[in-house]
Amino acid sequence: MPYFRVEDLVPAEQLPGIERRAVWLKGVMLTFYSFAPGAVVPEHAHPNEQITLVTKGAMSFTVANETRVLRAGEGASIPPGVRHSVRVLDEPSAAIDGWSPPREDYMTTA
């Protein structure tokens, strides 16, 4: 499918208060996240490269023990194997993640 609408991608609840939609090709993936206020992504690491862009709201990111509040238009680059976590602040928020290679566990179809 060469074209898509984010609203038409199959939603998946990743964690309480966190909804994910994904589109991917063989070597790259984008995930579109919606976050409820106060949602938390616990500390974790994965073998994928990840680039996150906050598109709405504000989130406290911790990457390799360095914490920053990121707002719309700001992002983080996370190398493979680096521990990181996220805490959404007091407003609904959204972000786009780029992945390489794609996360097979995030591939959801209708």
Image (cartoon, helix red, strand yellow):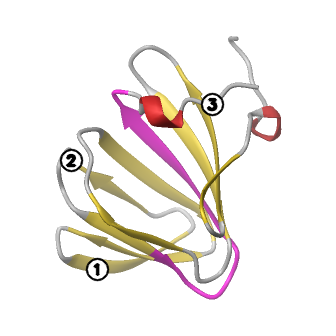
Q: Which residues are magenta?
A: 87-101
Could you tell me which residue is drawn at 56 percent across and 42 percent down?
31
- Residue 67 is marked as 1
Could you tell me which residue is drawn at 30 percent across and 52 percent down?
77
Instruction: Name the residue carrying label 3.
Output: 108
Specify the principal SS of the magenta part.
strand
Indicate the quadrant where residue 60 lies.
Answer: bottom left
Compare marks 1 and 2 and give the one earlier in the sequence.
Answer: 1
Q: Nearer the viewer, mark 1 or mark 3?
A: 3
User: Is 69 inside the magenta-drawn segment?
Assistant: no
Q: Position of residue 33 (x, y in %)?
A: 62, 54
| Kind of element beneath mark 2 | loop
Compare marks 2 and 3 and give the one earlier in the sequence.
Answer: 2
Identify residue type, mark 3. Answer: Thr
| Kind of element beneath mark 3 | loop
User: Is 89 inside the magenta-drawn segment?
Assistant: yes
Q: Is residue 46 above or below residue 23?
A: below
Instruction: Name the residue carrying label 2.
Output: 79
Identify residue type, mark 1. Answer: Thr
Q: Position of residue 10 (x, y in %)?
A: 74, 35
Report the quarter where the N terminus lies. Answer: top right
Q: Nearer the viewer, mark 2 or mark 3?
A: 3
